[in-house]
């Protein structure tokens, strides 16, 4: 790997005596890691069924390294949403964001959804997550990942943060900003980023980072906590952005966080920032800072006026669902029925890709449940369940969108599970299950 000469000069100045160790690490292969979806399965239970050789990521309680020869992205457990494949250092920002009951949380630059799914795994029914990215096309990946993780109390939106700051001033209890950056920390894992760095450098990202962070600071409640992260080493994009924020608001405190393998910030007065270097830990380059705005204030879980939707076929379907849905209400939008969390979030004039949980679609007078609902359920929360073992050839057939045989006497909707973890719905007719697994979630 040939690194740009001016970049190497900057790194030598930054690392000093550790420069040679960094260069040596850059010649080593990247490590591979995944994060267990604790919304669906506990860490202990996943380790009992895992077909992979896993070792813990020290700074993420549900993060694990796996061997490069293994391919978890093709395993049926991936399609059941039991884990997310994520670079180990990228697990740090969400793991450092504390979530309290009643918190309304903003993931400001969410796509493709890795950090949003990590935040969601820490939430309970009193929380609400707003997963935003200015790119609507990139948010499609976020939406898919949130659905597979079974996240219900969230909105997936695509809007400009500066515009949002005028609407949601002093609104969010917690904010995570994984800012667009020059990507220096990912050169080893993705060498194609080197050409982008040569073309743009760090300077082109700084104005964007200042605008994003300033907007988020406006939206952060008094006492709220904000995490800022990048995957770059540039002081301009890291400590100097934190300095910019603290100049804007003197009440900001840079919190001290202790994590194994993390280095302190490189600028005097900003030592509480955290730097992740590939020669110091098993992961790529990252920067993380955790800040609190003023004094702690009590979280507020506000209620919205409830609406209701009734239709005979939908009501009949609901009789088969035992999942608690008492912290929200049903709303009919176009041809779809949504379960909306009862925490207030004004979506007027905001581009919304998903509100809460999509229950399904009304096709004239007939209701058809969604893939999102299937992933949001437990096997105990639907009346009729077909549970297939991971080695059952019918599981592979179902994942490929094929019809599978059914030996029971039931008819109507069935929740198809891998072991006890839902994959999707099917419709039983004449001892066969008509496959209702949505195409975007099928195994190619």
Image: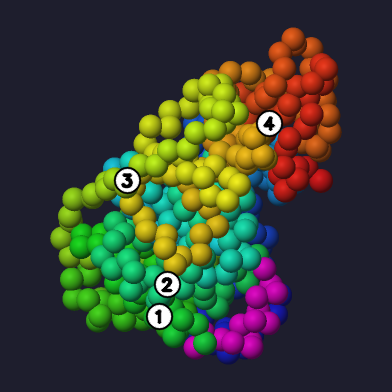
Q: What number is the disc on residue 161?
A: 2
User: Which residue does the image show at 65% across and 81% down from the upper left?
Assistant: 196
Label 3, on which residue? Answer: 305
Disc 4 element = strand
The picture places residue 225, in percent across and down from the top left corner, at 29, 60
Image quarter of residue 114: bottom right
Q: Which residues are magenta?
A: 190-203
Image quarter of residue 282: bottom right
The picture places residue 308, in percent across and down from the top left corner, at 43, 38
N-terminal of the two: label 1 or label 2? 2
From the viewer's perspective, tell me whether residue 109 is left or right of residue 191. Answer: left
Label 1, on which residue? Answer: 211
Residue 145 seen by the camera: no
Could you classify mark 3 by the number of other residues whose Cα lies within 10 Å: few (under 14), some (14-19), or many (20 or more)? few
- Residue 413 magenta-drawn? no
N-terminal of the two: label 4 or label 1? 1
Dot in front, 4 or 2: 4
Disc 3 element = loop
Q: CA distance from mark 4 to mark 1?
A: 44 Å
The picture places residue 287, in percent across and down from the top left corner, at 44, 68
Dot in front, 4 or 1: 4
Q: What number is the disc on residue 425?
A: 4
């Amino acid at each position: 790997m040939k690194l740009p000469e001016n970049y190497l000069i900057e790194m030598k100045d930054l690392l000093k005596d550790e420069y040679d160790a960094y260069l040596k690490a850059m010649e080593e292969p990247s490590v591979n890691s995944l994060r267990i979806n604790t919304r669906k399965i506990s860490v202990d239970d996943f380790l009992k069924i895992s077909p992979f050789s896993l070792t813990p990521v020290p700074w993420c309680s549900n993060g694990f390294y796996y061997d490069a020869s293994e391919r978890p992205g093709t395993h049926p457990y991936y399609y059941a949403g039991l884990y997310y494949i994520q670079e180990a250092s990228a697990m740090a920002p969400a793991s450092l964001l504390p979530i309290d009951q009643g918190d309304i949380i903003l993931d400001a630059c969410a796509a493709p959804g890795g950090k949003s799914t990590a935040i969601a795994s820490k939430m309970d029914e009193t929380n609400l997550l707003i997963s935003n990215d200015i790119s609507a096309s990139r948010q499609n990946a976020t939406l898919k990942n949130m659905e597979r993780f079974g996240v219900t109390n969230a909105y997936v939106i695509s809007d400009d943060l500066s515009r949002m700051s005028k609407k949601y001033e002093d609104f969010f209890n917690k904010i995570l900003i994984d800012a667009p950056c020059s990507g220096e920390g990912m050169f080893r894992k993705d060498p194609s980023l080197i050409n982008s760095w040569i073309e743009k450098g760090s300077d082109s990202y700084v104005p964007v980072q200042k605008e994003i962070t300033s907007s988020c600071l406006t939206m952060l409640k008094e006492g709220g906590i904000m995490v800022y992260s990048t995957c770059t080493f540039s002081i301009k994009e890291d400590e100097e952005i934190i300095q910019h924020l603290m100049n804007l608001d003197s009440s900001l405190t840079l919190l001290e966080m202790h994590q194994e393998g993390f280095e302190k910030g490189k600028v005097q007065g900003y030592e509480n920032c955290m730097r992740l270097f590939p020669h110091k830990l098993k992961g790529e380059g990252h920067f993380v800072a955790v800040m609190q705005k003023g004094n702690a204030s009590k979280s507020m879980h506000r209620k919205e006026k409830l609406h209701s939707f009734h239709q005979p076929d939908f009501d009949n379907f609901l009789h088969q669902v035992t999942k608690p849905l008492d912290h929200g209400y049903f709303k009919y939008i176009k041809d779809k029925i949504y379960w909306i969390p009862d925490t207030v979030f004004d979506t007027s004039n905001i581009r919304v890709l998903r509100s809460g949980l999509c229950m399904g679609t009304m096709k004239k007078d007939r209701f058809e449940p969604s893939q999102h609902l299937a992933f949001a359920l437990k096997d105990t929360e639907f009346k009729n369940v077909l549970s297939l073992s991971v080695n059952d050839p019918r599981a592979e057939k179902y994942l490929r969108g094929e019809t599978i045989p059914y030996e029971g006497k039931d008819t109507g909707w069935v929740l198809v599970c891998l072991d006890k973890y839902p994959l999707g719905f099917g419709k039983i007719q004449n001892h066969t299950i008509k496959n209702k697994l949505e195409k975007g979630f099928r195994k190619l």
